[in-house]
Amino acid sequence: MKLFAQNRWENPTSLCRLESKLVLKLTNASPEWAVGTPVQLFVHGWNAKTDSWQHDAVAFTQGTVTPRHMVNGTLFLLAGDGSSKPRNLQPENATLPRGRYLVRAYVDSDGVLAKEPAAMLGEQHFAGQAEIKSARWREGFRQAETVSGSALK
């Protein structure tokens, strides 16, 4: 699995965030992550033409570690200014294509989000990444796309 620098949008203020009904669940979160700790999950798509992961995330969610050591949340789909996203796209229509994705986890172990809830965690919070080889994004928590925390490398 190829590693790369943290996703950084050139102009984060121009980033389009579209809420969806798609859910991502991380199971088997590290026992080192205390219950209630915020975790940010970034989803990166696979670019078959370049044989590499897309530099910028295509989706994002944030949740807290549950007593069952899971983290889950609905995805916000992300697109830059140059996106061809239709202006009238609604959450019930927002989706990601089936395929290969990389989930990168960032753990707020030092309370950054308590001070600044809209912050994006930095590389010092990087906890690992895991591939979903054949994601089938569907609506709702019962059909959440799942990645195991034990697969984070």
Image (cartoon, rainbow, N blue to C red):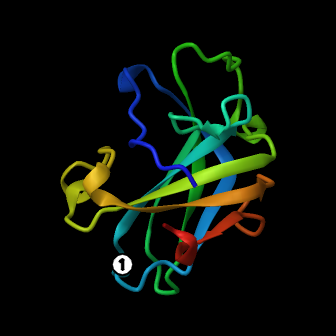
> In the shown orientation, is residue 22 left or right of residue 61?
right
Q: Residue at x 57, y 13 (%)?
A: 82
Compared to residue 85, the image places residue 108 above or below, namely: below
Compared to residue 16, the image places residue 108 above or below, namely: below
Q: Amino acid at mark 1?
A: Trp
Q: Residue at x 72, y 37 (%)?
A: 94
- Tell me residue 55's x, y (percent): 51, 34
> In the shown orientation, is residue 88 left or right of residue 65?
right
Q: Which residue lies under the disc numbered 1? A: 33
Q: Which residue is at the front of the view, 109 or 113?
A: 109
Task: Give the quadrant of residue 86.
Answer: top right
- Tell me residue 113's x, y (percent): 26, 55
Q: Which residue is at the front of the view, 78 or 88?
A: 78
Element carrying mark 1: loop
Compared to residue 134, the image places residue 96 above or below, namely: above
* Quarter of the image with the N terminus in it: bottom right
Q: Residue at x 30, y 59 (%)?
A: 125
Task: Give the quadrant of residue 131.
Answer: bottom right
Q: Residue at x 60, y 52 (%)?
A: 102
Compared to residue 142, the image places residue 81 above or below, namely: above
- Tell me residue 149's x, y (percent): 53, 74
For label 1, the crowd category at 10 Å Cα-Cα, with few meaning under 14, some 14 to 19 and many 20 or more, is some
Report how many numbered discs are placed on residues in the image: 1
- Tell me residue 29's x, y (percent): 49, 78
